[in-house]
Amino acid sequence: MDITYNHLKTYVRNQLFYPLINRQLSVLNSSFGEIEKTINAEDITLIYPKNLFLDNNFVEMYIFDNKEHLIMSIYKDELITSKIFCLRDITLVDSTFNLQNDARTLILKFRDGDIVELNSTRDTNSNHSRTFSELILGISRLILNSRG
């Protein structure tokens, strides 16, 4: 599956038609509505759906737009919380690649002390870890390009 905002949204909505509605996907579907109240979906350049395809975990969405923002949308305790970061406020980008298990990690530290950590093998199942690794590379390139 190609993971873009529109593909993810279509995937989630198609899965909701099955008799056993997955709570993770139901929450994710609600998150799309909340996100679109804040930003224009056409401005989204990249999305990283942390915990997608992991049972018993709710998806955390990390959305990058064409205005150099990172929008983090997290569901916890019956609340969907969004936080918006400016890419210019990143103070450290730490990227690693593990040669033994092909895990790619990206840690972003922000001026206000917030930390975002993405890991291609922990954030999804083994069937999608390569795709998540590619997403992390895309995020790295996007950040580098935004910093001139």
Image (cartoon, rainbow, N blue to C red):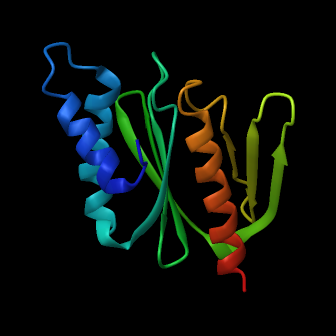
Q: Which quarter of the figure is the N terminus placed in? A: top left
From the viewer's perspective, is residue 123 above or below residue 147? above
Residue 98, quarter of picture: top right
Q: Where is residue 113? Give x, y as percent.
A: 75, 55
Residue 122 pos. (x, y %): 65, 28
In the rendered image, the quadrant that contains the C terminus is bottom right
Q: Quadrant of residue 99?
A: top right
Name the residue rendered at 44%, 52% in the picture: 82
Position of 8 with respect to 84 (left or right) is: left
In the rendered image, residue 127, in percent from the top left (x then y), is placed at 54, 27
Instruction: Return the residue found at the far bottom.
Output: 148
At 34% from the left and 45% from the top, the residue drawn is 8
Question: What residue is drawn where x is 40% and y is 54%?
Answer: 4
- On the picture, is 143 further left or further right than 102? left
Asked if residue 109 is positioned above or below residue 17 in the image, the reply reads: below
Task: Say if 62 sits above or below 65 in the image.
Answer: above
Give the mark count: 0
Judge whether residue 40 can be spotted in this image: no
Q: Nearer the viewer, residue 37 or 144?
A: 144
Residue 126 vs residue 42, the one in the foreground:
126
The residue that appears at 55% across and 30% down in the rendered structure is 124
Q: Residue furthest top?
A: 20
Q: Is residue 129 left or right of 8 when viewed as pictured?
A: right
On the picture, is 107 further left or further right than 75? right
Please indicate, yes or no, whether residue 102 appears anywhere in the rendered image. yes
